[in-house]
Amino acid sequence: MMTSNFIDYVKINVRSGRGGTGSSHFRREKHVPKGGPDGGDGGRGGHIYLVGNAQLWTLLHLKYQKHIIAENGKGGEGGRRSGAEGEDVYIEVPLGTIVKDAESQEFLAEVTEDGQKVLLLPGGRGGLGNTHFKSSTNQSPRHAQPGEEGQDRWVIMELKVLADVGLVGFPNAGKSTLLSVLSAAKPEIADYPFTTLVPQLGVVAYRDYKSFVVADIPGIIEGASEGKGLGLRFLRHIERNSILCFLIPADAANWVKEYEILLGELTKFNPELLQKQRVIVISKMDISIPEMKDEITASLPADLPLVFISSITQEGIQELKDVLWNTLQEENERFQAELLISHPKNNKENEISLEDEESSED
């Protein structure tokens, strides 16, 4: 993802199609001079759909397309012929896209799976032809319904990067270097802060052909939740990571303070982030002395996994992969357990239905 091409926020106008007008027509043939009403219905207007596309990584293709308009439905015709439906519009978006109303900020839709299709705006219904209004007291109705207007609204699309592991740390903590070592990703690496200006994704190859996705989130500074530094723009990407990997350099002035500042900024942005499992990684061990490990271990939370690594010498990289993989499995098991609790299977109903089937067979 190139810096200039990564677009994670767009504001566009979407308009579904208007329904076609119903026909007010009467049957007129050579030997049927006074035939009854036979006006057809109008076709519905085109819908606007969102479609998830796993091959897209950015909203760049929508940046310069400010208006997306579906086709109107065609009017009905005589002989009870219905008008053609307006052509639907399918907007392809990357996985992790959220759509909100631009004025009210109301949540409208979310796309998280490849091929997922979400109806964003329905087209207007076509009007009924005059054949529907025939009655015993009015056998020659001369009116038909107009089609419904389509919906028109401005929407905001936001992309939140989907990844298994999110790398969280201060600028220049070594996140990009670690990502390049863990995966085949080639992020820009330099010895100055804010080298990474957009989220970078990398696929980590694990044992037995397994893999998981790691996201390098641009550096967080104190006050990021209030808009300082790169601010809120990239904090939202962290919401979509299954687990969070806090990266703290060994040469930091105060390891505990760095961790607490990072955790505090995430909490201010979204308190629900505290529920995610965390792993602490101490980077740049190649420039530290071995005796520092005990001091660092004693100062950081004892209930969180702690891994010491060096991206330069590859020290601890395989251990880190093991810890991340195991933590991901724990998180998946926890998620499945919560899913079963919130949507329990009703075994009693299943048993009753089976008994009913057996009794009906008897």
Image (tube, rainbow, N blue to C red):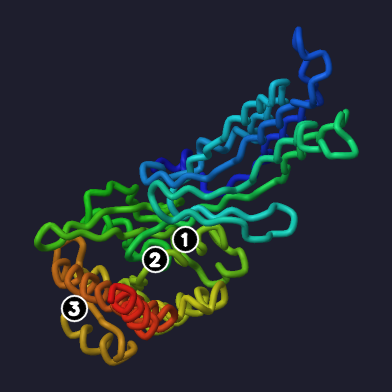
Decide: marks 1, 2 in contact (CB < 8 A)? yes
Residue 289: numbered disc: 3
Pinpoint residue 148: horizontal percent, then vertical percent. Answer: 76, 39
Q: Secondary structure at mark 2?
A: strand
Circle 1 residue: 237
Tell whether 339 sits left or right of 66.
left
Q: Earlier in the sequence, mark 3 or mark 1?
A: 1
Q: Amino acid at mark 1?
A: His
Quadrant in which residue 39 is drawn: top right
Q: How many marks?
A: 3
Quadrant in which residue 258 is drawn: bottom left
Q: Which residue appears at 44% of the width and 50% of the height?
A: 116
Spatial CA span between label 3 and label 1: 35 Å
Pinpoint residue 169: horizontal percent, then vertical percent. Answer: 40, 68
Circle 2 residue: 241
- Is residue 289 or residue 255 the one in the foreground? 255
Q: Which residue appears at 11% of the width and 63% of the height?
A: 207
- Is residue 336 or residue 271 the one in the foreground? 336
Quadrant in which residue 340 is drawn: bottom left
**Which image quarter holds the N terminus?**
top left
Spatial CA span between label 2 and label 3: 33 Å
Residue 164: numbered disc: none
Spatial CA span between label 1 and label 2: 8 Å
